Image: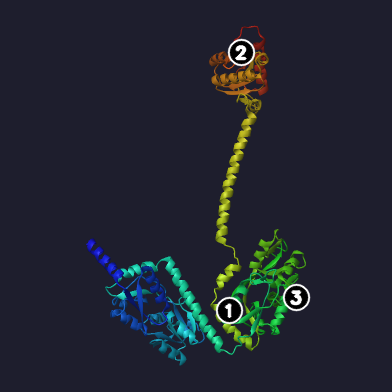
Amino acid sequence: MFIIILSSVSGSVTAFENRPHFTVSTEADDIITRVLFDAIGENFGLKFDYVQQPNFEAILNSIENGNSDFAANITYTEERSRRFDFSQPTNIEYTYLYSYQNLDLAKVKRLGVPEGTVYSDLISINYPEIEIILYNGHDHAVQLLESRQVEGVIDAINQLKPLLLKGFGAQLLNDYLSIQPVSIITPTGKNSVLLARFVSFIHSAEFQKQLRESIEKYQLEIRTQALRQSIIESDLNLTRTLKIKLQNVSPYAFYTTQNHVHGIGVELVKRSCEILMFNCEIVSTQEESWESMYDDLLNKKIDILAPLAISERRKALMNFSDVHYQSDAILLKREGYKENVYRNVSELVVERIGVIKKGFIHELFSQLLPNKEFTFYNSREEKLNGLLKGEVDYIVMNETNFNRELRKSKHLLPIEKDALIGDFYTANIAFAFPKNELGEKLVPFFNQAIQMIDIKKIQAKYDLQPDWRSILLAEKRFAQRAQWLFTLVIAFMVIVSMYLHVQSTTDNLTRLKNRRALHRRYRAGVGANLTLIYLDINDFKIINDTYGHEVGDDVLRQVSHQIRKVWRGSCYRIGGDEFILVGVIQEKHLTATINQLTKVNYHNLQQSLNLDVYLAIGVSSPRKRFMSLESAMDDADKKMYRNKHSNVCQGEFMFGHQ
């Protein structure tokens, strides 16, 4: 069975590869179908012939009758699945509301919907109050719109070009309606294996990106073409140069040393003028005050002013475009000044406040603080310096500029956001036009142009917001590294401390513990059960004088080795040739131990030297109670010297009892 299936698939693919071309059923201006099958043809080396149908129903009939091989942008339904073979979903169906006034769907009462589509069900479910009028084809849709039988029609992207060029507006509905993704269909029982191969290619990330970019480019070109046509048909003087002024306020607009200007507003106004085919000139300079620019707009000396925050008072004085930017205003003060005193701006009655004359904050604060006298500045920099110098107590700045000033300053600025008031207002920013006939005509054209521009991309270029995720990851990495570094430092310090401790309590020559270690260990006294032995090398000075200090040092090392070999307690070298041994030892074993320590055989092969080195020994035996270290050493020292200077034979010793 597996062999049969494999043979069937192989045969289908072979037939597909040998076939010269296929037919694709489509409607006029169906850009998605052409992007899909042009890419498939290029990828698989195939040729597709496009057969244009008068309407959507004709496309379905063409596939069902076998007159065409494929059709794209078909929504799956149970009824259709019995007529066609469907691929997996390939793309979204770009759907628009076409109307004269760019209406929102929620405001439409009578809506035209193409016959044979799923749009009727979608509208009935989501907007049951809308009356649906069915139409058949493009001409019927235009007739419904022009006769005002409907307020708008809903249709796919293939109607975008013809309807926009006829002067209708288009609103994308994919974010407002739950529109199913669409598929490619083929006649039942034919090309199903080929369809799977097509879909595998279409689902690739590379093609999905290509499809999105192609549709975006197509929409922009069509909208630009339609908008320019409407401008040409208007009575605007296209040879007139529009004069524009932009306030020097980053990131919206900022001037370089050559008086070149950059920023969000600059790119937005230039792109808008390019789309609209207007001659535009930025005539403002870096040094010009906001008051001067504002007065020029009111006196109709310029055609556009930006950025301007929209307010009810200003609406009576000028025309505004749609909002294209928002700015959060924050209240700033000197660090430590009146902490947690005010909660609202209207409470700043007794405070000195710096503003830019005729700026939006001047207007806003004049309403919140009637009859308040303000300190006026010409620019943001002057206002900030006034706060730093103590000329004023509070100023207002947007969040972006505040962060920019903090980053730009070489030193930490002693200013902070007021903790209780903080962000107190979000300003809606727009282009402002004179309150005259020209200004009123320019507004709708600029609104349409702004809608066609990728504002988010422009904002991301200039309005640098903190990437909190990256900052958090960096902080976590820093904390981890700091923790590891701290651990390493602590470990290093412990090792160094241990090393220094060992060095300070160890004799460098013999590696026995030294006098300091002895006194630290027994500063509280010598236990009653401990034996303390005092050792002194006899005639050590003679050894040094006769054989040299190198041999003398070697003798000390040999003696130390012998001590470690026979003594299980603590061993200390407390002087040049003096040693102290402390430990628990039974009296019956003490004699044997002392016998092994009394004489040490020293051999030096390099100098062919053999010596019997004798040690004088004094013992402070266990006692009934604790004894101070000095007393125990003194007791053993006396016994050792009696042993050292006695006339007994070498090897004899004296016991000391307490």
Say what secondary structure mark 3 lies in. loop
Query: Dot 2, how many residues are within 10 Å of its Cα: few (below 14), some (14-19), or many (20+)?
Result: many
Question: First in sequence: mark 3 or mark 2?
Answer: 3
Say what secondary structure mark 1 lies in. helix
Q: Nearer the viewer, residue 612 or 424?
A: 612
Q: CA distance from mark 2 to mark 1?
A: 109 Å
Say what secondary structure mark 2 lies in. strand
**Which of pointers 2 and 1 indicates the residue nearer the eye?**
1
Instruction: Tell me the kind of residue under disc 3.
Output: Lys
Instruction: Tell me the kind of residue under disc 1.
Output: Glu
Residue in the image at 31% along x and 81% along y: 62
Q: Which mark is residue 372?
A: 3
Location of residue 266 by image quarter: bottom right
Is residue 219 in view? yes
Q: Quadrant of the C terminus?
A: top right
Q: Nearer the viewer, residue 478 or 390?
A: 478
Location of residue 383 by image quarter: bottom right
Q: Are marks 3 and 2 in contact (CB under 8 Å)?
A: no
Question: First in sequence: mark 1 or mark 3?
Answer: 1
Question: First in sequence: mark 2 or mark 1?
Answer: 1
Q: Which mark is residue 614?
A: 2
**Which of pointers 1 and 3 indicates the residue nearer the eye?**
1
User: Is residue 560 placed above or below 110 in the rendered structure?
Assistant: above
Instruction: Tell me the kind of residue under disc 2.
Output: Tyr
Query: Dot 3, how many residues are within 10 Å of its Cα: few (below 14), some (14-19), or many (20+)?
Result: some
